[in-house]
Amino acid sequence: AQTVTQSQPEMSVQEAETVTLSCTYDTSESDYYLFWYKQPPSRQMILVIRQEAYKQQNATENRFSVNFQKAAKSFSLKISDSQLGDAAMYFCAYRRWGGATNKLIFGTGTLLAVQP
Amino acid sequence: KAGVTQTPRYLIKTRGQQVTLSCSPISGHRSVSWYQQTPGQGLQFLFEYFSETQRNKGNFPGRFSGRQFSNSRSEMNVSTLELGDSALYLCASSPQGQGISHEQFFGPGTRLTVL
């Protein structure tokens, strides 16, 4: 069975600084998707960034980028130039490859605080 | 396009009652998944529907059930409510079959409180 682990329950960053959130996962599959979701206090889950396991290039979305280390089964999220609006709970998630299921397996989350 | 909508947004029930939650996916999305979010257990997968068929189910007791209608709207039902069922229930839809993004779009959730 696949598992996702986020070892940092809480993180804090100064506005305009950079912060990295950690995620490790366990799977025996070679192809899969990895995601970072953001859940602000409003509780609406929002996709931040995605990575297909077959892609060696790390995904980037504006100020958000990932460091995907497939052999180490590590998938960290880097937020550059942190903004107050980045304060939220961040979840790392795993999805099997293919169209048979959309089931996401989530980590326990990291609560990110942004200090002005 | 309108996003995923969930009704009701808040619900208070007492132990032993049953409850039905509704989810309307984004227009054109045929896949709907449900998740339970609690402080203790985190986000847990309940079940997934695609074209009115349940194609995946999480490790929840039979008190939790769901269905999907021909218009892709989905409902989940919890019978004989227990205090531990208090949670935020999230619904997500996906454009399954229409592309390869497989991104899931989440609704705002239904906050269920069991007294």
Image (cartoon, coloured by chain):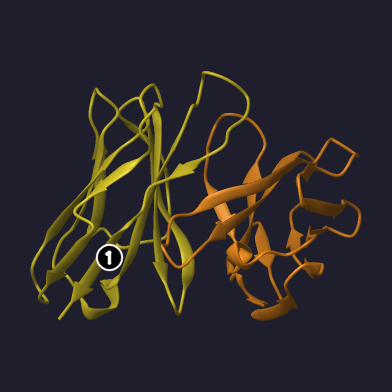
Chain colours: A orange, B yellow
- Vertical order, A103 against A45 (above or below): above
Question: Dividing the picture into quarters, in which one does residue B59 lie?
Answer: bottom left
Return the x and y of residue A98 as percentages of the image width and height.
Answer: 64, 30
Q: Secondary structure at mark 1?
A: strand
Closest to the observer, B74 or B7: B7
Residue, x 58% and y 71% (percent of image)? A108
- Vertical order, B104 against B28 (above or below): below
Instruction: Give the residue number, with chain letter if any, for mark 1.
Output: B111
Identify the residue at the far top of this view: B98
Would residue B13 appear left or right of A28 to someone viewing this image?
A: left
Return the x and y of residue B10 as percentages of the image width and height.
Answer: 21, 63
Return the x and y of residue A71 as percentages of the image width and height.
Answer: 91, 54
At label 1, the amino acid type is: Arg
Whether residue A8 is visible to the viewer of this picture, yes or no, is no
Residue, x 63% and y 45% (percent of image)? A95
Question: Dividing the picture into quarters, in which one does residue B72 lie?
Answer: top left
